Image (tube, grey):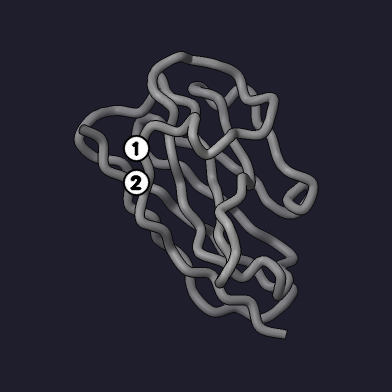
Amino acid sequence: QVQLVESGGGLVQAGGSLRLSCAASGRTFSPDLMGWFRQAPGGEREFVASISWNGGSTYYVDFAKGRFTISRDNAKNTVYLQMNSLRPEDTAVYYCAGRLGVREVAGSPLPLHDMNYWGKGTLVTVSS
């Protein structure tokens, strides 16, 4: 079974950048639609961005558009989230997750219940 491990979180100043990584082991996730989610302290987990199985399509929620970039390297079994122009409201635990092997495009928000496997998250704290 696939395991996901996020890394790259930390403390950054507002306006700064951070690059998150999500490394998979156990099996390849190359056929899977992958996504990033986040959960602010005391909040609920929400969708951030997704990327199709081959990286050919991506989708972002409004708060991420123009600031965040999702990418994947299937040869490395890794998904990335480049976050620029960070704001204090971006403070959250960021999770990556996958939806099994359908080779679908990314074109809509991903409901949490549609995801088949999750990482444990990495904390991003943005100070003002």
Q: Position of residue 23 (x, y in %)?
A: 34, 46
Local crowd at mark 2 within 10 Å, few (<14), some, or many (≥20)? many
Which of these two is toward me, 114 or 62? 114
Residue located at (60% from left, 64% from top): 43
- Do callouts 1 and 2 mark residues in contact (Cβ within 8 Å)? yes
Q: Distance between the residues labelled 1 and 2?
A: 8 Å
User: 49 above or below 44?
Assistant: above
Amino acid bearing label 1: Lys
Q: Position of residue 27 (x, y in %)?
A: 23, 29
Residue located at (46% from left, 46% from top): 96
Residue 15, image quadrant: bottom right
Which of these two is toward me, 91 or 27? 91
Instruction: Name the residue tied to disc 2.
Output: 23
Amino acid bearing label 2: Ala
Task: Give the quarter of the figure containing the C terminus.
Answer: bottom right
Q: Position of residue 2 (x, y in %)?
A: 26, 35
Instruction: Name the residue tied to disc 1.
Output: 76
Query: For numbered disc 1, what is the local secondary structure?
Result: loop
Local crowd at mark 1 within 10 Å, few (<14), some, or many (≥20)? few
Task: Give the quarter of the figure containing the N terminus.
Answer: top left
Q: In this view, does 69 lie to the left or right of 27?
A: right
Query: For numbered disc 2, what is the local secondary structure?
Result: strand
Residue 91, image quadrant: bottom right
Q: Position of residue 35 (x, y in %)?
A: 53, 39
Residue located at (54% from left, 59% from top): 19
Q: Is residue 68 left or right of residue 71?
A: right
Upstream in the sequence, badge 1 or badge 2? 2
Closer to viewer: mark 1 or mark 2: 2
Residue farthest toward the bottom in the current orientation of the protein: 128
